[in-house]
Amino acid sequence: MKLLISGVLTLAVLIALHVPQLKKKKGIILAGYALGMVLFFAVYNFRTLGNIITFYHPFDQSMYQKEFLEEGEYPDAFLDEFFKGKTVYVPDDAYDVKDEVGMDTDTLEQFDEDGNYFLYRYYHSVNMWNYLEFNRAEVIKDPALNGILISDEQKALFEDIGYANDMMRYTFPMTKYNGEWGNGFHYYWFYNAFISESHVYICTEGIDDESPLVVICQHERRHDTDSYYIASKSYFDEVIAK
């Protein structure tokens, strides 16, 4: 509407400038046009301030288009509101990583005893904890969830809601590390080059506004990728964990 009105006003001024009787008043017409446009945009923007989405706070960016689900894009646009205020149980399986600025990674053991990259548990456990806390969830680290894997049969209970690579790589501002593995470039390399497509899956059985949740971060070794499984705590304990 704003563009339409401004276009009509502009067209009217252009027509007026070509009327012979008004050519001597060209300056007055242009000044009136400029003043009118300034007043129009000022009034229009003031009346529509409530519809403007600010860019300086991430919680305001909660738009979620139906195409996102169809294309598997930006699940965090949904999860931001979904996790808010919920209690979320996660495995307590992260180990600390020695952090010294300038430390040469070539001198480190690159893979742990399970064959995972040495930052695996940090990048997959701690980053998910940070992500959940950032999205205003209460995180409970439960050692009883350590080592639990979602079987191929159980995966049929979950629905794929989209890619997690970008969602997880943007957790880098919350890292405690000052070394290279704590900067955004390393996060980009890890989540967008080192591992394959990472997905978020959710089981909707038993989920309501108040139900506690479980989030399992699982390395799918066969596909060299990662999966994040979300389920209600009650359904997880009664069906999935048995």
Image (spheres, rainbow, N blue to C red):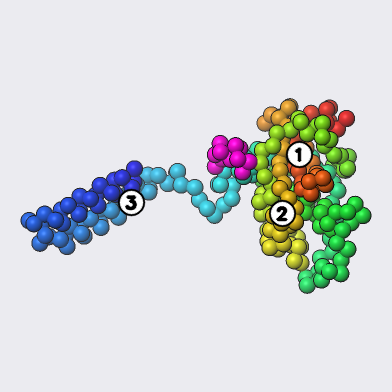
Most distant residue in the left direction: 21
Real-space Cα distance between discs 3 and 2?
44 Å
Q: Amino acid at mark 1?
A: Tyr
Q: Amino acid at mark 3?
A: Phe
The crowd level at tag 2 (other Cα within 10 Å; few <14, some 14-19, many 20+) is many
Q: Quadrant of residue 5?
A: top left
Above or below, comparing residue 137 to residue 180 in the picture: above
x then y, percent, for residue 138: 73, 42
Residue of label 1: 229
Depth order, front residue of 18/211? 18
The answer to whether 76 appears left or right of 126 in the picture is: left
Q: Quadrant of residue 242?
A: top right
Mark 1 element type:
strand
Q: Amino acid at mark 2?
A: Tyr
Q: Is residue 44 visible?
A: yes
Dot 3 or dot 1: first in sequence order is 3
**Which residue does the image show at 10% across and 62% down from the upper left?**
24
Depth order, front residue of 85/147? 147
Q: How many marks?
A: 3
Circle nearer the viewer, 3 or 1: 1
Circle nearer the viewer, 3 or 2: 2
Residue of label 2: 191
Residue of label 3: 41
The answer to whether 112 appears left or right of 228 in the picture is: right
Which quadrant: the N terminus? top left
As for residue 48 lying within the magenta part, the answer is no
**Which residue does the image show at 78% across and 46% down from the upper left?**
223
Above or below, comparing residue 83 to residue 37 in the picture: above
Mark 2 element type:
helix
x then y, percent, for residue 218: 80, 44
**Which residue does the image show at 79% across and 41% down from the upper left?**
216
The residue segment tinted magenta is: 63-73
